[in-house]
Image (cartoon, rainbow, N blue to C red):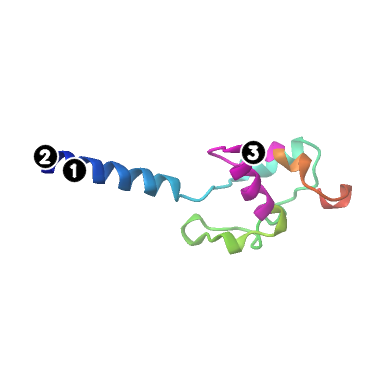
Amino acid sequence: MNRLRLMTALSLALISAAASVPATANPKMVKEAKDAGLPAQNCQYCHVSKVPQKETYKPDDLNERGKWLLTEKDKQKSKDVKADWLKNYPGGKEQK
């Protein structure tokens, strides 16, 4: 019975850890945004820093567009952020 409890506890811990991993962007997303006709030039399109580091990432490192993408990820119940969603970013053309 103790073994069953241990396995259950480990399973729950693993699921919790996987759910808490932040969404990660990559240079491919900048290319996808450009291909969609959006004015993305570098990572600062969604991040505060020009070259964000995975190891030091915090949600505070995102600008308003990046924070909106995280919110959209939760709304869509998606595992990953999709560059395609940027077309729906609220605001005028200059903010897309």
**Which residue does the numbered mark 1 point to in the structure image?**
5
- State the separation of the CA atoms marked 3 and 1: 38 Å
Q: Which quadrant does the N terminus fall into?
A: top left
Residue 8 place in picture, x, y as percent: 24, 41
Residue 46 appears in the picture as rendered: no
Q: Foreground: 30 or 62?
A: 62
Residue 67 place in picture, x, y as percent: 65, 55
> In which image quadrant can residue 32 be found?
top right
- State the separation of the CA atoms marked 2 and 3: 44 Å
In the displayed structure, does residue 50 sit left or right of residue 96? left
Q: Residue at x 44, y 46 (%)?
A: 19
- The residue type indicated by label 1 comes to Arg
Residue 95 place in picture, x, y as percent: 83, 52
Is residue 25 one of those drawn in magenta?
Answer: no
Q: Residue at x 84, y 51 (%)?
A: 91
- Return the mark for residue 82: 3
Examine the residues drawn in magenta and state their main secondary structure: helix
Q: Are marks 1 and 2 in contact (CB under 8 Å)?
A: yes
- Return the mark for residue 36: none
Q: Secondary structure at mark 2?
A: loop
The answer to whether 56 is drawn above or below residue 91 in the figure is: below
